[in-house]
């Protein structure tokens, strides 16, 4: 999986940082997570083909997480998109986008499917042999979901030297990766375990924004490879964080620790802070592997 | 008047150019004309205090002219705005913005007044002793207005040497500028015509976007100081221009010529063109004083 941060400011865009949006690529498939104003500009800036996006996940209906969506949907039409687009987001999102398009006297040329969410339980949105995507119900001022993306590693890795030594032809490779035994040139059966290394562990990426400190998510995100957790504030502004149902860097780190994730990415920073390193410093008091978001920054997961 | 181009791309934003938005300052008052996605970013980039805007004029409800409005309205709230904001735009704009704000579970702290437009006749929207703003009904695929801004020059200019020679004290200056006679130190009446130059002519700025070639606007914009007229296409794509109810550079120039304006600014360029100088060249075959829009470019009117 490859994650690209398209925007990580809270509330409103700044000169050098846009509001929430991320692109996650799993096995060449592109998933857009949140879509703040200007996301289509950021996608272009970072070389993403707009048409490669097939599924968009909107956490909640605050403007800094979805005011870029109507523009992106319109632009995809103008670019001649044919293939369908799926939008997952809170109930109400369909009415909003529909109204905006109708006011403009137009509709999309492609199929636009809205999947409206209202459950407060974790729900599987998409699942196949390669990935699984489910909601992470969060606690914010309005109905909000995070999203857990799991890349399923269902292929073993070939021990290529052994495969060649046993004279196994290439047509069998795919079957062997999926667990079948091999047959050598002279008809001998070769046990799969002699030809492969065990498959890698599944990788997972948990996106949690916006939310207050909410340990109820821990069973869902337990042992994730990477956790993105909002940290709008530092502990010195904990009162405002509580009042607005946001988290501090320390609280995000507490979640990362309890969930036993491998890495924590912080983001959704309030514009009141000039030095973002303070977020890293605060979080590292609790959890060691912390990274800061930055527009354009990428992470291999 | 001072005009700042905030965006002049048609359809969708590009890496180096945003969609339609302009800031017009008349006597220190700020008027925003159209508000494509990312306008709030552009305002910051060009050093405009967001809170200085009191009136916003939306030409029509295509996304490239108003998808930045919900974000700007939300941001003004977050910045603690108190003073009212007036939004002039086609019927439907209130429902759209209201729905988006309600989905986010919030409203503005300041008074937000919508003035919905549906007349196909030129209508005065704002008028006082210093300026007048009226609609310019245009012809596009959906209901669209341009806007004519007139700066009323109601003060004569003092002939400062004469005023001093007649020993007229400064407390009388304002009255003299407005046409009163002066009284010298020794009580002598001095005719206003001896103390002032005639007042300057009113200045006017006509914004016409989006529209097909539509000579019906000429009586409204006749003798304007500056005309901004959309030129989405060049003559080589006139068929597409006709089909989509846009104008070519030549057609914009034809309007400028017939309306006898002093200067024509072209904008709303289609992304298919790499060399915008072709727009200037084409227009100059018909009308001599042509300028091209550019994000961040300013014009003193």
Image (spheres, coloured by chain):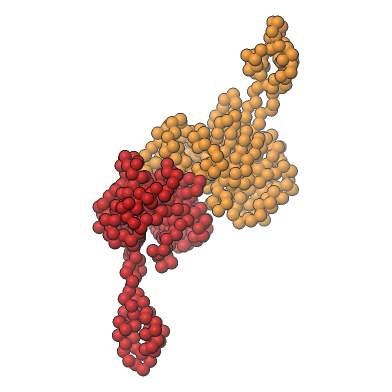
Chain colours: A orange, B red
Residue B221 vs A68, above or below: the answer is below
- At x 63%, y 52%, the residue is A233
Front residue of A268 and B61: B61
Front residue of B290 and A17: B290
Query: Which of the 4 image quarters holds residue B149?
Result: bottom left
- At x 31%, y 89%, the residue is B189
Q: Position of residue A108 (x, y in %)?
A: 40, 36
Residue A192 vs A295, above or below: the answer is above
- At x 32%, y 84%, the residue is B194
Q: Position of residue B123 (x, y in %)?
A: 28, 58
Residue B67 in sight from this viewpoint: no
Horizontally, is B298 left or right of B230 in the view?
right
Front residue of B32 and B253: B253
Q: Seen from this angle, which residue lies furthest top? A: A186
Front residue of B35 and B293: B293
Q: Position of residue A46 (x, y in %)?
A: 56, 42
Residue B261 in sight from this viewpoint: yes
Which quadrant of the figure contains the C terminus of chain B?
bottom left
Which quadrant of the figure contains the N terminus of chain B?
bottom left
- At x 41%, y 84%, the residue is B170
Residue B179 vs B23, above or below: the answer is below
Horizontally, is B253 left or right of B76 in the view?
left
Residue B196 vs B38, above or below: the answer is below
Query: Which of the 4 image quarters holds residue A266?
Result: top right
């Amino acid at each position: 999986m490859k994650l690209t941060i398209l925007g990580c400011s809270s509330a409103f865009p700044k000169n050098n940082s846009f509001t929430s949006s991320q692109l996650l690529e799993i096995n060449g498939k592109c998933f857009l997570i949140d879509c703040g104003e200007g996301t289509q500009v950021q996608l272009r800036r970072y070389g993403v083909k707009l048409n490669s996006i097939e599924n968009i996940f909107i956490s909640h209906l605050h403007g800094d997480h979805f005011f870029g969506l109507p523009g992106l949907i319109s632009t995809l039409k103008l670019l001649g998109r044919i293939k369908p687009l799926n939008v997952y987001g809170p109930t109400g999102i369909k009415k909003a986008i529909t109204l905006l398009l109708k006011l403009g006297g137009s509709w999309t040329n492609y199929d636009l499917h809205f999947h409206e969410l209202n459950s407060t339980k974790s729900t599987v949105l998409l699942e196949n042999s390669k990935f699984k995507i489910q909601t992470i119900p969060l606690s914010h001022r309005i109905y909000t979901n995070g999203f857990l993306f799991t890349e399923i590693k269902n292929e073993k890795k070939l021990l290529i030297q052994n495969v060649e030594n046993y004279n196994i032809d290439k047509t069998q490779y795919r079957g062997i990766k999926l667990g079948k035994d091999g047959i050598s040139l002279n008809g001998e059966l070769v046990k799969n375990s002699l030809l492969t290394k065990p498959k890698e562990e599944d990788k997972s990426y948990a996106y949690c924004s916006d939310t207050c400190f909410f340990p109820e998510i821990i069973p869902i995100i337990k042992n994730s490879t990477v956790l993105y957790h909002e940290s709008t504030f530092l502990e010195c502004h904990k009162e405002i964080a509580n009042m607005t149902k946001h988290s501090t860097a320390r609280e995000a780190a507490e979640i990362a620790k309890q969930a036993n994730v491998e890495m924590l990415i912080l983001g959704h920073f309030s514009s009141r802070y000039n030095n973002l390193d303070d977020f890293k410093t605060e979080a590292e008091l609790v959890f060691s592997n912390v990274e800061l978001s930055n527009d354009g920054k990428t992470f291999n997961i």
